[in-house]
Image (cartoon, grey):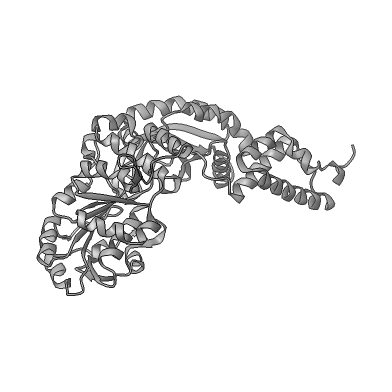
Amino acid sequence: MRSPSLRDIPAVEAVLRDPAVQTLIAEWGRLAVRAAIREQQDELRTALRSGHAAPASAAGTARDLRRRLLLEGGRGPRPVFNLTGTVIHTNLGRASLPQPAIQSLANAARDPVDLEYDLAAGRRGHRDQHVTALLCGLTGAEAATVVNNNAAALMLVLNTLALEREVPVSRGELIEIGGSFRLPDIMARSGCRLREVGTTNRTHLDDYDQGITAQTGLLLKVHRSNYVVEGFTAEVDERQLAALARQHAVPLVVDLGSGALVDLERFGLPAEPTPMQSLGNGADLVTFSGDKLLGGPQAGIIVGRRSLVERLNANPMKRALRVDKLTLAALAEVLKLYTQPERLADELPVIRQLARKQPDIRDQADRLAPLLAARLPDFEVAATDMASQIGSGALPQTQVPSAGLRIAPVDGGNPDGKLARLTNALRALPRPVIGRVHQEQLWLDLRCLEDEAPFVDQLSALELAGQ
């Protein structure tokens, strides 16, 4: 039998014409695939010259190219199955949008829209007009505005109302959010000076009172949405803080973060503070996210007193932080759903997924376990009860009863290597499957797997993807 030689390596153009490689071109683009082929072939030439390898088969070539392309990135965001057990997963795009929002977003992407055009008056309008009435109607605020995320909302408020001035904040509320972004850093970049009051576990009204000076721009209260302080603790009620702010003629700003617009207890979850409650308690401005518990697109929402919102809109920073037509189109449809709260459990994905009953999820796990086990002879696949979490800093101590698949290597050497091979194979599927490794096992929480047919349909590719 003739030994393989450099002549056996196909031309790049011939590889590009292969149907499996054409599929990769549709996903990643011709330039990226061509570069991966050249890299692959350079390695093959080096190996052949040293007598260690033969050219890969066409199928093997496509699989290897997909692996290389995944490592390089640059494809753009792609759909994945979120089986991590974290419903609002920051790394996986947070909230999934409801169908009306998706359709509205597509319409706005395809056609010209009245983004900044007042149809009634026939002249230029303001882009916030598409959501302000909805936000004010839902929260009871006098006015509202929208920027690109909640950190931006807080920056805009601080830069507008407290530039080069002091902002008292309880030491127990100096939060750090995902990606190591810390409140003190955001405040510094906003041009204001942090004045810490109280202690980590206990802050009293007198602490705020003593922290207010002629240089105070506003009082800031931050909802500790992503952690809990327990034990010997104390914090100041919003009503008391609002009265103190009025006494000193400074605004009270409440940063809620997660942004629930409905009482979560109706869905069997612990209560989360709402903008309506903070405004009712006397807050002058409230900031919150659009893509967490609210269940919409990424956005930072500010509601409150009209005079203050007008000042925010007049700040040149507002233009740098404004949202585009796609965000507004999606956000408007999500807010419309909240005007009919009885529809939320059926139509808003975040609420629908959080409200799924454990027995239903367990039935799904029982159906899927044998199907996955058939593809994984080296693993034990078991349907089991699990506990989901909400994610994105919301209700950090709340665990929602769930169910899923627990996958463990059968007895044998190198269990860590087997798990790594399996997780790599799942991530390399046409629609990647993202779970979590826990106790030397792979856990696939099925709470967010509402449509199981696409998951089942691609299981036949699992063995190939893992080879």
Residue projecting furthest to the front: 122
Q: Is residue 56 above or below residue 244?
A: above
Image point 16% across, 67% down: which residue? 208
Residue 175: image location, x then y, percent: 30, 60
Q: Is residue 397 above or below residue 410?
A: below
Residue projecting furthest to the bottom: 214
| Side of 231 relative to 291 (left or right) | left
Q: Is residue 415 visible in this depiction of the protein?
A: yes
Residue 85: image location, x then y, percent: 39, 41
Depth order, front residue of 329/219: 329
Splitting the image into 4 quarters, where does residue 165 fall?
Answer: bottom left
Q: Is residue 296 above or below residue 366?
A: below
Q: Is residue 273 visible in this depiction of the protein?
A: no
Count the labels in the image: 0
Depth order, front residue of 44/370: 44
Quadrant (top left, top right, bottom left, bottom right) of the C terminus: top right
Splitting the image into 4 quarters, where does residue 163 fall?
Answer: bottom left
Residue 108: image location, x then y, percent: 43, 38
Q: Is residue 336 above or below residue 209?
A: above
Residue 406: image location, x then y, percent: 45, 36
Quadrant (top left, top right, bottom left, bottom right) of the N terminus: top right
Depth order, front residue of 10/56: 10
Image point 32% across, 69% down: which residue? 191
